[in-house]
Image: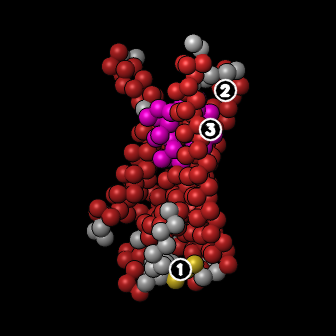
Amino acid sequence: MTPLRQTFRGYLRQRRHTALTAAIVGAFLVRPLVGDSPAAPIVFSLAFGVLLLAALYTIQVDELVGDRQVLLTQRRRRSLVGWALAVPAIAERIYMILAPSPRLYVVGAISWLLFFGFVTVSQLRSLLRQKQVTSETIAITISVYLLIGLTWGMLYITLFELHPDAFSFPAASSPTSDLSPDSQNVLPVFIYFSLTTLATIGFGDILPLTLQARYAAVAEGIAGQLYLAILVARLVGMQMGHAVRPDTRD
């Protein structure tokens, strides 16, 4: 391995959580930037592919603090599960570009739901293992919050594809279930709805109608508030403990 490559790999390893956060934000920004052009689904799928690879790399890297053999076993398990969930998800994205199918879209939504759910749990566990507040700790905190929104967005898509009457949409932007070229906004629309629900903004332009959709929206709002309250308290406690610790040694 060349010194330049080794240096880059070490830098990426140290900034992997920041890279994941940037990939998530990039995936959010791509769709509104490209608009409804014919290339929008392809560009959006590429952005999700970059996000998937960044997530897979992040969950496979540990500081290996503790029992090395146990941590290596856990890393291997995370890698296997991550790739097992990622392969059908990325295959669905590729196939949907070539031959859109409503039935395949349901399978894809479930695949992405499982993948993002797994990555969210892995990142949350990594966050809870942090001992001090650094820029990477802040990056994990942001990425977990955004991943919660992505995971719930996939849940809403699954509910919508199984029950098209689960949500009420404005007439001008109603996504349809036939996946025609004009309906490729299903994914970004539900990500938008998920993020507004997570942040408890509640514009009211998209309304859950079925019991399952309503409870999913309420659960996301509660999860978002609990996450912010608990994690902010933990970060403050970590920072205060780190600031007080040098004085205790005097």
- The magenta stretch is 123-144
- Which of the marked residues, 3 or 2, is nearer the chain's N terminus? 2
Vertical placement of 244 versus 147: above or below? above
Find out whether residue 41 is within the magenta segment. Answer: no
Q: Which is nearer the eye, 78 or 205? A: 205
Mark 1, other Cα within 10 Å: few <14 / some 14–19 / many ≥20: some
| Residue 161 numbered tag | none
Question: Taking 86 as reference, is 171 left or right?
Answer: left
For disc 2, the marked residue is: 71
Q: Which mark's residue is nearer the viewer, 2 or 1?
A: 1
First along the sequence among labels 2 and 1 = 2
Q: Secondary structure at mark 2?
A: helix
Rendered image quadrant of residue 160: bottom right
Task: Please say if 196 is above or below 52.
Answer: below
Kind of residue at disc 3: Leu
Q: Is residue 187 visible?
A: no
- Residue beneath the point at 62% across and 69% down: 218
CA separation in Å, label 3 and label 2: 16 Å
Q: Amino acid at mark 1?
A: Leu
**Quarter of the figure that contains the N terminus:** top left
Q: Mark 1 = which residue?
A: 207
Which quadrant of the figure has residue 66?
A: top right
Residue 32, horizontal then vertical, whole percent: 33, 64
Foreground mark, 3 or 2? Answer: 3
Q: Is residue 146 above or below residue 15?
A: below
